[in-house]
Amino acid sequence: MIEVEIRRDPDDRVLEIHCFSSELAEESEEGKLVEVSLSTLMKAAFIGLKGYLRLSPFFEDEDGRVILKLKRDHLLNREIDAILETVLLSLRAMQEQHPGIVEIKDAATKVNV
């Protein structure tokens, strides 16, 4: 199983994406393929945020864990959203194509009182 956790700000914008792969995911060829695909997708987002938007995201990809964190620049919200929401659409497509291998937890921090 590969768990993906999405963390958002109070305005419901993505701040962090954490992906954790269990040993079970690595036991099957399908699990290995999905793990490599997910890592590549996250790396592409990092490259776009850093290279194209000139931001300084945090990126870590090691030992079955991929983390992408970003301090948002409000002047670039539209561009950042385009990159990160495209990643989320791709992750959801992976979840649909590989049921039981990818699980997404989209934890909005927005609190309605």
Image (tube, grey):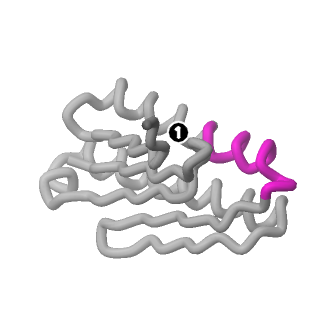
Residue 80 percent location from the top left of the image? 73, 50
Residue 17 percent location from the top left of the image? 47, 56
| Residue that extends furthest to the top in the rendered view of this protein | 96
Residue 71 lies left or right of residue 24; in this view the side is: right
> Relative to the observer, which residue lies in front, 111 or 34?
111
Residue 7 percent location from the top left of the image? 46, 53
Residue 22 lies left or right of residue 6; in this view the side is: left
Say what secondary structure mark 1 lies in.
helix
Q: Residue at x 25, y 29 (%)?
A: 99
Q: Residue at x 83, y 68 (%)?
A: 54
Q: Which residue is drawn at 44% across and 42% down?
A: 111
The residue tagged 1 is 88
> Relative to the observer, which residue lies in front, 3 or 41?
3
Q: Residue at x 15, y 60 (%)?
A: 23
Q: Does the magenta stretch include residue 79?
A: yes
Image quadrant in which the C terminus is located: top left
Residue 67 lies left or right of residue 79; in this view the side is: left
Q: Is residue 67 above or below residue 108?
A: below
Residue 22 lies left or right of residue 41; in this view the side is: left
Query: Crowdedness of circle 1 by 10 Å Cα count: few (<14), some, many (20+)?
Result: some
Residue 47 percent location from the top left of the image? 70, 63
The magenta segment is 74-85
Q: Is residue 90 above or below residue 79?
A: above
Q: Does the magenta stretch include residue 50?
A: no
Question: Count the marks: how many?
Answer: 1
Q: In this view, does 77 lie above or below 113?
A: below
Q: Which amino acid does label 1 sit on?
A: Leu
Corner quadrant of residue 48: bottom right
| Secondary structure, magenta segment, majority class | helix
